[in-house]
Image (spheres, helix red, strand yellow):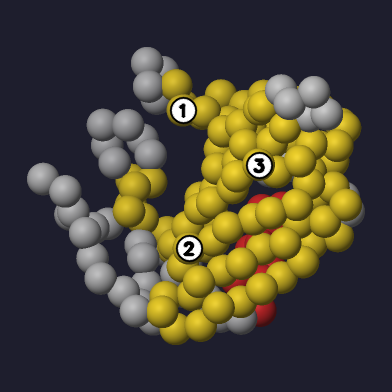
């Protein structure tokens, strides 16, 4: 069964990150500043240090990898904003390419830093999204079933 909910659009918030700023940290600051309860987001720009993760289903844990320092162009990035208790959860994925077109991507991890700029567009919902721990995977999944 596919779970779903319906939410209306409250407003759109646009932000620009500066070189070297931690992407997740700064998005969370924007969420708090604008009192965003839930939403969807897209990012465009570049990263100066890429750090991504993927979920290892056999071990039920995230594995992280550092692409390292160097300019990468953000090819695609999207995510959502929800709550786990009082905590803001930014769940974002990104694909970024180097100067030869080699692409790297995955779950955006702490330590992934803006390059020349990261422009963020947040579609803030008029209702909340919540996450809770799924016992089978250990992941904090959206509560929509």
Q: Position of residue 102 (x, y in %)?
A: 71, 23
Q: Quadrant of the C terminus?
A: bottom left
The disc, 3 or 1, on the residue closer to the chain's N-terminal end is: 1
Say which element carries label 1: strand
Q: CA distance from mark 3 to mark 1?
A: 21 Å
In the rendered structure, the answer to whether residue 124 lies left or right of residue 130 reads right
Say which element carries label 3: strand
On residue 40, the disc is: 2
Q: CA distance from mark 3 to mark 2?
A: 18 Å
Q: Nearer the viewer, residue 57 or 123?
A: 123
In the rendered structure, the answer to whether residue 28 lies left or right of residue 1 reads right
Residue under label 1 = 55
Q: Nearer the viewer, residue 128 or 85?
A: 128
Residue under label 3 = 75
In front: label 3 or label 2: 3
Q: Is residue 39 above or below residue 48?
A: below
Q: Position of residue 133 (x, y in %)?
A: 33, 45
């Amino acid at each position: 069964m596919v779970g779903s909910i319906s939410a209306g659009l409250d407003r759109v918030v646009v932000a620009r990150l500066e070189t070297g700023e931690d992407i997740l940290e700064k998005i969370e600051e924007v969420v708090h500043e604008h009192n965003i309860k839930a939403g969807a987001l897209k990012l465009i720009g570049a990263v100066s240090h890429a750090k991504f993760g993927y979920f290892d289903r056999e071990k039920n844990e995230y594995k992280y990898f550092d692409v390292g320092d160097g300019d990468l162009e953000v090819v695609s990035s999207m995510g959502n904003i929800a709550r786990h208790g009082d905590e803001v959860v930014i769940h974002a994925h990104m694909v970024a390419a180097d100067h030869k077109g080699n692409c790297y991507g995955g779950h955006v991890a702490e330590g992934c830093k803006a390059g020349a700029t990261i422009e963020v567009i947040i579609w803030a919902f008029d209702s909340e999204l919540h996450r809770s721990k799924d016992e089978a995977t250990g992941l904090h999944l959206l509560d929509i079933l």
